Image (cartoon, rainbow, N blue to C red):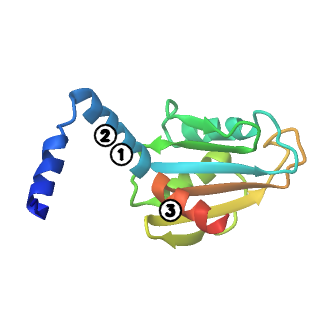
Amino acid sequence: MRNDEDEDEDLVADTSPLTPEEAAEMQELMHDLFGMMLSVTIETDTPVPGMAEELAQQIRVGIGEPECRIQIDDGTHDAVVGPTGLHTDDPHGALQLAVAALGGTWEDPDITDTSMGPVLHTSRPADANTHKTSAPRVHLWAGTAFSLIEYIEEHA
């Protein structure tokens, strides 16, 4: 008869250490999930091609990370900048940098605490400098990828 200790030994025997390539991939994934992200959304009924990407490019230059990855949600008006090298314990500072990069008058940020960390959100009216469209508002969020995922799940 086998006991729990024998089963634990079998589980350990079935696992092998990560190869250097797998360890590097795991480290990159952890950086992505726990890194500071900035999300920009254009409030509009009809997506305007390139508008969210244009603002995301302004953000990444404004935060001093012109090579930072931009993820575009195809067919929508959303873009995410990151993971950035900004401090994950300072989403307020990250949001301030993004706001400064885009300019304009922004609302005071709202803070939502999630179990994975805080998410800060602000918005401002779109203006003629934003793009040639009648989009009413631009929204910004700052938080780690995990906290943004949780925020989205709670507010969907």
Q: Distance between the residues labelled 3 and 1?
A: 22 Å
Left or right for 58, reference 87? right
* Place of residue 14 in the rendered image (x, y in percent of width and height, measured from the top left): 18, 42
Residue that badge 2 annotates: 27
Q: Is mark 3 on a helix, strand or loop?
A: helix
Q: How far apart are marks 2 and 1 (CA)?
A: 5 Å
Amino acid type of the residue tagged 1 in the rendering: Met
Q: Nearer the viewer, residue 18 or 56?
A: 18
Residues under numbered marks 3 and 1 in contact, where contact means CB atoms less than 8 Å apart: no
Callouts 2 and 1 close, C-beta under 8 Å: yes
Q: Which residue is drawn at 74% across and 59% down?
A: 124
N-term-proximal mark, 3 vs 1: 1
Res 86 seen here: no
- Residue at the disc numbered 3: 92
Q: Quadrant of residue 15?
A: top left
Q: Name the residue under label 1.
A: 30
Extreme residue toward the right, this view: 134
Q: Residue at x 75, y 33 (%)?
A: 50
Percent x, y of residue 49: 80, 34
Question: Label 2: few (<14), some or many (≥20) within 10 Å?
Answer: few
Residue 58 spot, x, y in % from top left: 63, 38
Instruction: Report the front residue among 101 and 91.
Output: 91
Q: Does residue 16 appear anywhere in the picture? A: yes
